[in-house]
Amino acid sequence: MESLKISILDLLIIVSYFIGVVYLGIWISKKKIKGGDDYFLAGRQMTWPYVGASLFSTNISSQQFVGQAGLAFVGGIAVGTFQMIGALSFGLLAVFFLDTYRGLKLYTSPEFFERRYNSSTRSLVSGVNVIMIMLATVSAALYAGAVVTLTLLGQSPDGTMLWTTVIILGVLTGSYTLLGGLQAVMITDFVQNILLILGGLLTLVIGITKVGGLDAIIAMQTPAGGSMWSLVHPIGHEFGWISILTGVVILGIHGHCTDQDYIQRALSARSSYHAKMGAIFAAFLKILALFICAIPGVVAAKLFADMGLQLNQDQAYVSLMIEVLPMGFLGLALAGLLAAIMSSVDSGLCAASSLITIDFIAKRDKSAMDQDKMLKYGRYTIMALLIFAILWAPFIQKFKGLFNYLMLLWSLLAPPVVVSVLAGLFYKKANSKGAVATIITGIVLGLVGFIMLQRPDIFNGIISLFGADGFSVRDDFNWYFLNKFNVSFLITVACTIVMWVVSEKTGQTAEELAQVEAIFEARKSKDDQMTPEETKKYQYALIALGVFWVSVLVLFSPWGIA
């Protein structure tokens, strides 16, 4: 057994933090929760700082700090484009999506599909969301949290210790989520957000100081000889500009503008102003995440190279924190890192529970929409989901390359959902037949894309059956077709064509025409309009976001320090 990696003081700080957050969540559950609206949508009374902080905390997880810092450790800050596209997507959420979502007074994001198309599309999208939330968010976060915790304690992250730690983290996080619902999640997220940002900035600043200042790291290059400080790369790069502008933007819209994890928080806002300003606030924080997630990976590469140490890339961020942060501050920063992991768990549990309760149980039992019954069903489903996540999380150890696998999965699943939502919002002729055809097409093409990317030998063999002997995806189209983001864009184009052709050929029923009008009227609803003063503040915030976004992009590009 290895020795403890942190001091007793740091360990006490982390434990005290956990106890405080759990107590806060339980206190909220006793004082504030009266029914289903309170439990799933925080009574629709949250203000923009809580909305924005919770949107950010939900998005920033162990994948960002451990996975993205690890990729930056070996390849520079190119992976930070995910943060920039995420910020852009939160801006799009505020400008193009929230008016309709809030005007319809939705409970869940898949409810939009039933209001715009039919119940079949809603059930399909909701079911996929639940599966992905549980497998890709909650279970993965529990596993990552257990690995980080055991590494700090000097324990091997496997066997009995892994199971024990997953159970402890699951019970701690699940307790306040189970009792307090979304309001407990959002208020604890706000507290966790402070530690998350301060811990990340502290790690960055002290780390840069320890390696000799900015001059010592600006000149760093990737193994291929390029700058480690550029967000803009040529088309052949995994994060080349074509892939970013097409595939990654699709992924960003899907994740930030349609997923229940995020839409649930926007729906909890007390007004349209607070919902939109919350999204803008989250966008600013996403840009800040470039500095606290990706750049520390580059600092770690410099520090450990100077020390003559070689690390697994996923150890880079935690190892940097242990190496550079003084006693006490290390405990606070690690509490922030574990806060990010806890936020992924609590947000995922609350989102998946609301989907099951509202999109499935309530559709079969109309009485489930009663506030007391909704509260009861919500807590039952969270308990069941938590047990599933705890049981599944340790088995993730058997998978390799989880981060890239998850990005591949989301890239291939996002296109039909994104096309269906955008068509529902902006294309009046889109109908239910077009939506169903689009979703089925997307699933089939996603499977084809998965085979092409993971097993090109099988794909080439299938192609040869149609007389294309000698065709090789790897040799003939390596730079484009073997990039998952480019494949995602091609699937999106195909889904768009299917939506347009089927909708144009089949036309709309009277009921569908009425649904279209309801959607477009909801966008103009006067029940939730911003005041002239609020509109002015919102417009100034949008302009400031645009200027900040462009400035950071230029700074970390061949026209800036790269």
Image: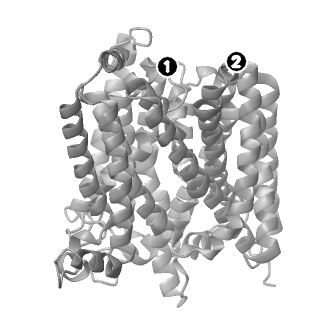
Considering every residue shown, the one lying at the far bottom of the view is: 308
Q: Is residue 502 left or right of residue 380?
A: left
Badge 1: residue crowd in 10 Å (few <14, some 14–19, many ≥20): few
Disc on res. 1: none
| Image: 297 above or below 124 | below
Residue 139 at x, y percent in the picture: 65, 58
Residue at 81% across, 56% down:
15
- State the residue in front, 97 or 221: 97
- State the residue in front, 479 or 391: 391
Disc on res. 105: 1
Q: Earlier in the sequence, mark 2 or mark 1?
A: 1
Query: What colouring style does the render use?
Result: one colour
Q: Quadrant of the N terminus?
A: bottom right
- State the residue in front, 108 or 170: 108
Q: Secondary structure at mark 2?
A: loop
| Image: 543 above or below 448 | above
Q: What residue is disc 2 on?
A: 370
Q: Secondary structure at mark 1?
A: loop
Residue 285 at x, y percent in the picture: 46, 45
| Image: 266 above or below 550 | above
Residue 231 at x, y percent in the picture: 30, 62
Residue at 58% across, 25% down:
46
Q: Is residue 362 left or right of residue 158?
A: left
Residue at 28% across, 55% down:
491
Name the kind of residue labelled 2 in the image.
Asp
Residue at 43% across, 46% down:
255
Q: Does the rendering let one see residue 34?
A: no
Q: Quadrant of the rendered structure where residue 243 is? A: bottom left
Name the kind of residue labelled 1 in the image.
Lys
